[in-house]
Amino acid sequence: MAVYNKQSNIIYNMFVLAFCCITMLIVSVDSAIFSIKNKHSQRPKLYSVGLDVTYDSFLNGKKIDQDLQSESLGVVGAGDRFRSSNNLKSNVNSMTQTAPDWYHRSKRNPTLSHAEIIKERVVLNGTEKSTQAFIHWVGKGTSERIFVLTCKIDYKNRISLVEHSQLWRSDDYGSSFKVMSFGPDRRISYMYPFPTDSSKLIFTDVMAKKIYTTDDELNTNKSYTVDVEPDIIVPHPVDPSKFLLYSLTQKKLYVSINFGVNVTLLAEDVMPNFFWAETGYDKIADIVHMEIKGGMPAQSLYKSCVVPSCSSSEVYAELSEVGPFITGSLTVQREFIFVQKSNWNGSENYLAVSYQRQKFKRAYFPGDVKTNDFILLNLDAGQVFLAVNHGDFVNLYLSDVTGQYFTLSLENVSHTIRLNWFEVDFYEVEGMKWTFLVNKQISTKSGMKSKTYISYDKGGNWAPLVVNQTCKSAEECGLQLQFMQAGFLNSIYSESNAVGVIIAHGFTGNSSLQLPSVFTSTDGGANWIQATIDKKPLNGIFRFNLMDQGGILTAISDGLLSGSNSTTVYYSLDQGYTWQSEQFDKENLIVKGVLTEPGITTMVESVFGHEMKEKPWTLIKLNFSQLLPKKCEDKDYIDWIPKDYNSVNTSCLLGSVVHYRRRNSSALCYSGGTSGTTKENKSCVCTQEDYECDFGFEKVGDTCNKSKWWNDYYLPSECEVNDTYHETNGYRKIPTDSCVESGISSKYERKVKPCPVIAPLRLSIISEAVNVQAGMEVTFHLEQAGGSTRETNYTWNFNDSSPSKEDIGFNNASMKKHIFHKSGHYMVSVTAVNVKGNTTAVAHVHVQEPIANAYIVAPWACVVKMQVTFSIVVASHARLVDSNSDHMHYIWRFGDEPINSLPTLTWNSTLSHAYNTSGLYKLTLEAVNAISSLYKEVVIQIFDKAKILILKFSENVSMYNLSQPLIGQLFTQRIRQQLAEDVGVNMNRLEAVLVSVDPVLVHLYIFQSNEDSEFNMTQIKTFVLDKISQGVLGVNILGRTYDTDNIIQIVSATELTTDEDNPSPNSGMNLKALFIAAPILVLAVIVSGVSFMYCRKKMSSLRQYNLLNNHDDTDAMLDDDEAPLDLNADFGIRESSRDDHLLESSGGSHLVMVTGNSSDHSVNC
């Protein structure tokens, strides 16, 4: 439940750093899910590993379980692909107008009539068990070096650990590789390139807390030890000497301003979602925007700092006034900052946007329909294009220039609901500004079907794709593209340097149940050609690639999902009109990735894979330069002008006409980097096409009419009495439009109107904590969705006998701090009133006192197979804590559980347990409420046998309230102490246990001594029975030093006989216990996993049971989002990794209610 960046596939999960020039690829064995590229972030995108997981940037707050036992392939990308260009040498012979050496990278040049693809095969020996490979071209046409990091990843308890890794470097563009060593036992986890200096890289060894820096492509390197695990590194987008370093386990953010020489703490309690400044939009280039841990689970606060310190005041103090928002939703992109907010009980989610770093404002959608989640798809040129999940359907919307008011672009987009998030069938064509492809759900006679639509004007107008303009029926004409929602591979592929060229998987007519075919377009998606080989369609799942600015198209059968082998490369030299094939390998390679270096200016691509499992990784370099030896001349190029085919075939797209110079598809020559350049860009005169319907209006024919749902509630809240506002006439200029103003512009000018007074509407209160410690200050934030604010009166009432607080004006009332001094449940309310009406909002707060002390009531000894009753009395600094009203729960370990077993959890402060063997046992007990915990332990001796007497007392015993555990404990202690004195034995020979309070019954245990000189059990029993029969035994609960008439006489004693070898299986108190049972986790996930993950962020109570690492006898204070239970206390210290943050959503084992039966006559200790 967060704001997701463009085509992002998670979960709070990983980081995304968009570098425009550098490409990183993760290649993992056997199966994977790729996240679709995300250009709205600064961080390296770590893509998924394994078919059972969608693994994305934890920037978007999407946290999921992983079962990553299979090998897989993923991609690490920055910007569009982490691709950078190289300038490598070759031995190509000189000939007229041949490609230069750096372009061909070839070692032979046969004649064109016999030209073949040049293949070079490299095997990375020793990588048989590596499950991942990260590939990085150093780059930008200046280096022949390629880095490959191979890793063996072990997934234990859903945590990824690097067991072994090797770093390989090629100095000849992949013809050979050598292992680069950082020292013995070093396990390199990741490598991070710098966007503005391709020779600089950072390598991390997370487990050893080491980083290695190089500024010369690893000719040399420097090693530094850091204080925390370097889980994530984010290089500065401009300054190559600076980077951020983040620890997932410790939630600490560090910064270095001298390329790792010094790494200093920047901020603590930072959530894994932070951003460097946006160049040109932030005041200072070294600002860091970040999420800080809030007071409740899945809740964050905004903070900004200027490196290298957060000690100074915040740069954007107004932005911090946004208050709590959903963790993982912060998105900083150009002039916009987004967060997703929720009301106090999670019943309403909405988007808040800051425009040009001004205060956050609520975003509005047509009809104010319910919004659940958001995906930011495009933020280019001052307009936000996003997808909104409304629960049962997903729509696409376009914003005004401020990003606050959205209008509908397309309804019922094909989507998939994932755990705690969603994804849509959407693709933005690279190199074609504002050309979008999307699958839309349409109703047919046979039910709902998916159909592909295209827009050339950023979602202003949409039309279905067609593959055959001369077909007889719409069904036959239609082309449905396959979007591969999970991102297994590039099902649709385009490049910014190959303008207008698209290659995709798709279906025609009703063939979507078959294997997809390959289709290509050379005009940005207006017309499509089906790829054929020998007049047969090219069907299947392929890995696509573009080279030489789109002059070469390739498709190689994918082996990642199917596990099938690939030996053939299919290629086209005329932009997809004709296709040829050639065998590239004889060893039946399972292809896991096909890449070319950034810029697609070369004719070389690299194929990655392995022959079979347990085989080393193999790289095959395919050089196509012999197929196109001739350099293109001017006559081989044409001017191409993209059009809006959905709007009377106009060449004016959003106010401008763009001329591109690109290679003619029929010219068999290579471009070498000169194709696809913009030749001319002219602005058009504004027409009606440059305007769209404003918020609150709908298009009917050629006009924009006011929507039925529109009312003054949607007027800007800043619009107050005596002010004016600009009333819309139903139109607004498209924010991305660059047309030249003309006479028609005056038709759409807004009118100045006086502001009306509007009744306040839809107040909501957001608390920074729901469970609050008594005496501690808590902050409340007020949100108002509509209505006037400046002249409105606001009254806060905290319902704790404190006076109400009144303010005039929303700015004065929007945030309040309050201290609750007594524990209890409180309903906080705010009432807003003006001359037009009033409204009220409420929020609930549970105030608790921290646990200050606890006392375990337990016998010091008992007998095997007898029920031992344990109780705990908990107190705060001011009072005894009522277990029921204070939501206290208890974690029990009795000391005889099997190794690695899980503890018992109860809401009841009393529990019984039977020990099966004699010995000394340690009972550990932890009392936990929402704000604190306390850990106690006690030792109990279990004997093989004992004599047991049932004691009855005189009527004056009723003067004491023995049902109180402490008084009952004092009473039995006096019995034990005074009887030991009367008999003349050590107190350790006796134990008294209160088993009933109405009537009062006590079991007196007599244990055997190891000393022959002492009384045996029978002698002690006889002595006690004799004295009781004489009426001379009594108990003074205040102690024998007090001369009192309130001695409680022991009036009778009878021996209890039990079958010690066959005790009652149902013995014990009738308690309802909660047992933490690991096997139930599987069942719980199957039955309720989806609903649990979806609601977890909104219902903080679902996070009551998790992990707690504070086992101190002192007051162990917890924040609301810290886990109160340590279910792994005896499991040792686990190793941390960048996947630890994913565990917060899994929450450990589930709880199951188990009801036990007991007999009222059972024997208890």
Image (cartoon, grey):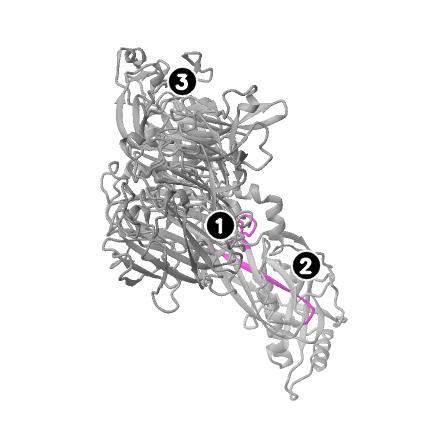
Q: Residue at x 37, y 34 (%)?
A: 430
* Amino acid type at mark 2: Met
Mark 2–mark 1 Cα distance, whole angstroms, equals: 64 Å
Label 1: which residue? 591
Marks 3 and 2 close (CB-CB < 8 Å): no
Instruction: Tell me the number on the disc at residue 1069.
Output: 2
Q: For residue 647, which numbered disc appears in the image?
A: 3
Question: Does dot 2 land on a helix, a strand or a loop?
Answer: loop
In the shown orientation, is residue 260 left or right of residue 338?
left
Q: Is residue 27 visible?
A: yes
Q: Could you tell which of marks 3 and 1 lies nearer the N-terminus?
A: 1
Earlier along the polypeptide chain: callout 2 or callout 1?
Answer: 1
Instruction: Find out whether residue 881 is within the magenta segment.
Output: yes
Q: Secondary structure at mark 3?
A: loop
Of circles 2 and 1, the one toward us is 1
Marks 3 and 2, how far apart at CA: 79 Å
